Image (cartoon, helix red, strand yellow):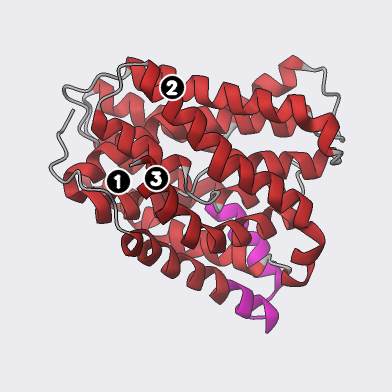
């Protein structure tokens, strides 16, 4: 595993500066939708193209070219799989007590488990430099398929429009999920040693560059800021799970298993991030409460400006 030379406790400003531009782009999407620019049809199409083309292109291009030489995958995979299993059990066991309808519950679950990859990579680079960024990409490549499997399972199982006893339907939804397929394709290309032809790699890279701005704009376009005061309970549950329970589980597991310090740092960064902008698209595509999801994304992005620096300093 590449060694990180910069191990000093992270500063509060580095994490904060990584978050502000992301929120400004989300705000830009909100302003565009507020003034009906371009129109509702555009935003609906933008959501789909981000979910099915742009974000998968980003995953494939990054994972296919990551340097995996000399990296021990076993223990990070074990820790991250156990982490998501544990947080999922917490949510499922507490569901009767929180009294949320199924659609809202799935969005709260995503809010408590998913992470914004773009912020994570930016923060890792700001805190630990280029070598830390390499480790962050590798950790993200492990976390993305795991978290997407759990999220798709939860969204499908608690989907009121389907027979949630159909294991075949759930399995098909997991296998057919474009984010999971992208991770598998990118990893397969990397392990096989087959290089993507330069012309196709360049096309993937161009698509990947559009994933971040367009994805964040679509989140902003879906915001209903007036509804934030009515979503206090879901916001509180999702944020406590995301910023307190999840990193506590992660760091406890890192103490039990032989996880290298640089990998532990990357895991910590990704467990204290606000939830992913892709959560909104996933909720929209699989029948979750996408409006609540957009509210959680925005609220957590704001909250992360305070929570992330404090948590990184405390655990670091």
Q: CA distance from mark 2 to mark 3?
A: 17 Å
In terms of image quadrants, where is residue 172? top right
Q: Quadrant of the C terminus?
A: top left
**Of helix, strand and loop, which one carries label 3?**
helix
- Please name the residue that numbered disc 1 is placed on: 200
Residue 237: x and y in percent read 70, 45
Segment colored magenta: 29-50
Q: CA distance from mark 1 to mark 3?
A: 44 Å
- Please name the residue that numbered disc 2 is placed on: 253
In the rendered structure, does residue 36 fall within the stretch colored magenta? yes
Q: Nearer the viewer, residue 199 or 172?
A: 172
Q: Nearer the viewer, residue 199 or 157?
A: 157
Q: Say if mark 2 contacts mark 3, CB within 8 Å.
A: no
Residue 54: x and y in percent read 46, 52
Left or right of residue 29, residue 41 in this image: right
Front disc: 2 or 3: 3
Front disc: 1 or 3: 3
- Asked if residue 66 is positioned above or below residue 256 in the image, the reply reads below
Q: Quadrant of the N terminus?
A: top left
* Sequence order check, earlier mark of 2 and 1: 1
Disc 3 residue crowd, few under 14, some 14–19, many 20+, Cα 10 Å: few
* Sequence order check, earlier mark of 2 and 3: 2
């Amino acid at each position: 595993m590449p060694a990180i030379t910069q191990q000093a406790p992270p500063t509060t400003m580095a994490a904060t500066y990584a978050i502000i531009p992301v929120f400004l782009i989300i705000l830009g999407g909100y302003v565009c939708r507020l003034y009906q620019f371009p129109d509702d049809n555009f935003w609906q199409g933008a959501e789909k193209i981000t979910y099915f083309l742009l974000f998968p292109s980003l995953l494939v291009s990054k994972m296919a070219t990551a340097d995996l030489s000399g990296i021990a995958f076993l223990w990070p995979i074990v820790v991250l799989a156990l982490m998501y299993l544990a947080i999922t059990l917490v949510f499922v066991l507490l569901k009767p007590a929180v009294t949320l309808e199924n659609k809202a519950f799935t969005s709260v679950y995503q809010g408590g488990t998913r992470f914004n990859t773009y912020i994570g990579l930016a923060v890792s680079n700001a805190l630990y430099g280029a070598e830390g960024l390499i480790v962050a990409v590798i950790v993200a490549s492990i976390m993305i398929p795991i978290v997407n499997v759990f999220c798709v399972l939860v969204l499908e199982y608690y989907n009121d429009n389907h027979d949630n006893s159909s294991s075949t339907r759930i399995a098909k939804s997991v296998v057919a999920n474009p984010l999971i397929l992208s991770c598998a394709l990118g990893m397969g290309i990397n392990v096989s040693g087959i290089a993507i032809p330069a012309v196709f790699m360049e096309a993937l890279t161009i698509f990947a560059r559009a994933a971040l701005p367009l994805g964040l704009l679509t989140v902003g376009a879906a915001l209903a800021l007036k509804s934030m005061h009515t979503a206090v309970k879901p916001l509180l549950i999702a944020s406590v799970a995301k910023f307190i329970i999840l990193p506590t589980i992660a760091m406890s597991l890192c103490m039990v298993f032989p996880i290298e310090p640089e990998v532990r740092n990357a895991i910590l960064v990704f467990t204290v991030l606000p939830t992913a902008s892709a959560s909104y698209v996933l909720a929209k595509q699989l029948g979750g409460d996408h409006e609540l999801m957009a509210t959680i994304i925005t609220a957590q992005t704001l909250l992360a400006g305070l929570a992330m620096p404090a948590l990184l300093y405390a655990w670091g």
